[in-house]
Amino acid sequence: RELSQALYQNDAAVRVVARLSQERDAAKQELERWNASVGAPPAGAAATTNGGAPTTEDEPGEPKPKRRRLEPSAEPLANDIPEDDFQAISDAWQQLNKERKPMLKAAAAEAPTPDNLAQYSEVDKKAWHKSTNKGIVCMAQSSDTDQTLIATAGKDKQLVVYKEDDQVVQHTFAFGSVATSIAISSVMVVAGDAKGKISVFSLGDDAGASGELVLESPIVQVCVHPSNQHIFAVTASGQVVIICWVAEEKRLQQISIFQKAEEQKEEYTCGSLHPDGLLFISGTKSGQVHVWDLKNKSLATSLKEGDEDDAVTAVSFSNNGYHIAVAHESASVNFWDLRKQKVAATLKDQLDSITAVAFDKAGKYAAMGGKGGVKITTVKEWGTTASLESKHPVSGIVWSKSAIETCSDKERYVHFYGVPSSD
């Protein structure tokens, strides 16, 4: 089906799949009980012919049964997801799909007005990284909890988790290298580096428990899936790797690798996960954006405006689920409407360079940061709603309830922007 049809009809399709999956599992259980009662071998087990040679149900040319869960030593699946993992991803989608409209409505009610945004200026700055090797290369914010958690990765090779509601540093983890990307949820913080290392640190009851995995290519993006069991890692070699965090065993395991055919592969530069977790986009050196459909285990489409190569520097999904912000090396930003697979607007000459883009929780505004500070636009209007000054190039942006936070790889401060107090 066309991607636009998938977006419009996703809800009904997943409900049908979930119901059929339940019916299938129930039928399998009933068959196993029946086999046990009559002494027959379970479905899929080896049987013997009159000559005593073992045979199986899987004759040559027939598809093998889908693996429900990979063994620790198993190779990751190619453009596929183990059944149990896909079920966890689908369950998260169903829950989030129910919550999206109320969440967007609540976020819109709390969002600042354009006039308020126009008044934003720096109201505070905090330094929680070491004064040596100054610089914060990337930052992220949790989206699955009412508490606002901000994670930053510094040139001091540390990861810091800041709890904004209480204005305290909650955790500091030694990563051991300078991260290229960081992601956070209510239960974990994840980072990757230029040597392919991915580390996860638990924020739950076993806070501090960690796991590590090394891929063969530099990591350009990490994302935590809403299932809170899976991590998506984008590699420079053109792969989207899905990793399972086996918390009880404190280990990471590759379960899936999504990539184009070898002759079509190209260098990836960044990535972003759909807020409901069933689509993933990856930006490329050539300027394309690949949209991976996890439900159908395939590349749904590739988006590109114009014929010239203009490397993608940052991408971000809106919480409305269909707007994508795509920043390019030319310092332009394309805002795509995924339903129509068309560019809704293009903003140019906003900044000297753009290395970070982020939508607010309501999907009402989008912020772009880089050399020259931060520019904010109102979705569907696409003018310049606000400008935030920054002495150094911005390397990361997050939206909180009443402020915008930014960081730079040239200094150790996190800057907080909001409406100045009248005191």
Image (tube, helix red, strand yellow):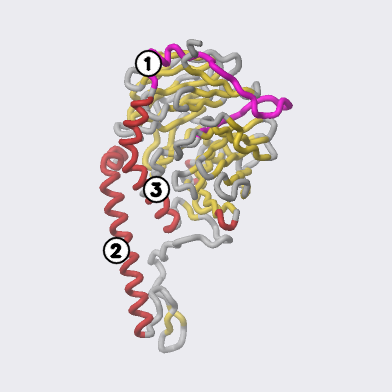
Report the residue that reaches farthest toward the right. Answer: 132
Task: Determine whether the residue tagged by mark 3 lies in a helix, strand or loop.
Answer: helix
Q: Looking at the image, is 412 positioned above or below residue 45?
A: above
Disc 1 and disc 2: Cα gap in Å?
A: 50 Å
Which residue, given by chain and number where applicable, does mark 3 sit on? 92
Point out the frontmost of discs 1 and 2: 1
Asked if residue 309 shows in the view, the reply is: no
Question: Which residue corresponds to the image point at 51% horizontal and 60% vertical from the top-left?
Answer: 70
Tell whether 39 sits left or right of 285. Answer: left
Q: Amino acid at mark 1?
A: Pro
Tell whether 19 sits left or right of 280. Answer: left
Which residue, given by chain and number where applicable, does mark 2 sit on? 23
Q: Looking at the image, is 49 positioned above or below residue 382?
A: below
Question: Which residue corresponds to the image point at 62% horizontal and 38% vertical from the top-left?
Answer: 171
Whether residue 137 appears in magenta in the rendering, the answer is yes
Instruction: Write the start and end of the magenta stretch as one range.
Output: 112-141
Whether residue 166 appears in magenta in the rendering, the answer is no
Judging depth in this view, the residue of 180 and 287 nearest the camera is 180
Judging depth in this view, the residue of 283 and 398 nearest the camera is 398
N-term mark: 3 or 1: 3
Which residue, given by chain and number where applicable, does mark 1 sit on? 114
Residue 197 in the image: state x and y as whole percent: 63, 43
Q: Amino acid at mark 2?
A: Glu
Q: Residue 219 occupies which quadrant of the picture?
A: top right
Disc 2 and disc 3: Cα gap in Å?
A: 20 Å
Judging depth in this view, the residue of 263 and 206 nearest the camera is 206
Label 3 close to label 1 by CB (< 8 Å): no
N-term mark: 2 or 3: 2
Task: Determine whether the residue tagged by mark 2 lies in a helix, strand or loop.
Answer: helix
The quadrant the N terminus occupies is top left
Disc 3 and disc 1: Cα gap in Å?
A: 33 Å
For label 3, the crowd category at 10 Å Cα-Cα, with few meaning under 14, some 14 to 19 and many 20 or more, is: some
